Amino acid sequence: MKDPLILVIEDEESIRGMLRMALEIAGFECIEADNIQSGHTMIANKRPDLVLLDWMLPGGNGIELLRRLKREDSTKELPVIMLTAKTTEDNMVQGLEVGADDYVTKPFAPRELIARIKALLRRSPGVLQDERMQVGKLILDGESKRIFLGQEILEMGPTEFNLLHFFISHPERAFTRGQLLDRVWGANVYVEERTVDVHIRRLRMALQSASLDYSSIIETVRGTGYRFSSRSVVPAAERFEASGMHSAHWQ
């Protein structure tokens, strides 16, 4: 899988240089812009996986660019971390309400910023581009954004896709609804925990085809939440035979 591409939009050359060095040491590819216009052009042409966006920029401010990105269908899911010297709570709230995924105030420790970037990319579908993950006859193809069960393509929404990717990446571990909200929806998205149950039901329904049923791969853990376990996967035909029922009985 290719290294994630990070766009730094920052007018101070010294800060861009520091960020470039920290990002490259951490294994990221880095491109730079020093104003809103060139930054927006790079987003359109280079398709970065994440943007580090300064608040105050020549020709406007980062909030204006952020609003534009969140209005456009092609960029509304692009992860954005605001970098700013503005430290008041009102500024922070404004940035998050407009659509920033995280907010880092200057001066900041490069190691902390790298940790925040990695955490955000783990929650973002943008880093799934080249991933192909397989569990039994279930295949998640990140490049095409498709799910295959045997020879069939499964239909599911983007939230269910991201849920499934997260579960496959963390097998045999129980997660609370709150943890799933934080890791899949994002820490700055405020939705009720019962929303998780709705999407789990949709995911289970989607994990079924005419000949295979992988819905049981998402287990309910009483008193906790949910767990992904490939041990519980049994093809539908085998379940019928095991229970003494044959497919002919259903014709």
Image (cartoon, helix red, strand yellow):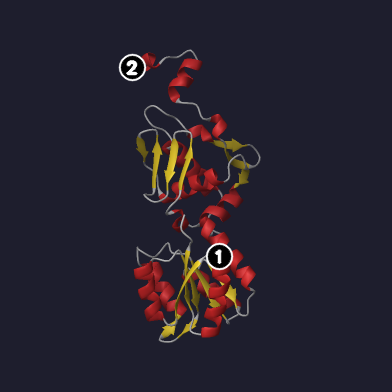
Using the rendered view, name the quadrant where residue 154 is placed.
top left
* Amino acid marked by disc 1: Ile
Find residue 19 and report its horizontal and vertical position in percent: 55, 75
The C terminus sits in image quarter:
top left
Q: Is residue 13 above or below residue 102?
A: below
Q: Is residue 114 above or below residue 53?
A: above
Find residue 134 and report its horizontal and vertical position in percent: 47, 40
Q: Which residue is mark 1?
A: 117
Q: Is residue 156 above or below residue 51?
A: above
Q: Residues within 10 Å of mark 2 (few under 14, many from 20)?
A: few
Viewer-proximal residue among 207 and 121: 121
Identify the residue at image location x=61%, y=42%: 225
Find residue 5 and report its horizontal and vertical position in percent: 46, 65
Q: Which circle's residue, 1 or 2, is located before the other in the chain?
A: 1
Q: Which residue is mark 2?
A: 251
Q: CA distance from mark 1 to mark 2?
A: 53 Å
Identify the residue at image location x=64%, y=69%: 111
* Amino acid marked by disc 2: Gln
Query: Going by the image, does 104 lie left or right of 128?
Result: right
Viewer-proximal residue among 199 and 10: 10
Query: Going by the image, does 189 lie left or right of 72?
Result: right
Q: Check disc 1 and report its element: helix, strand or loop.
A: helix
Query: Going by the image, does 59 lie left or right of 112?
Result: left
Using the rendered view, name the quadrant where residue 42 is placed.
bottom left
The disc label shown at residue 45, or none: none
Q: Residue furthest bottom?
A: 58
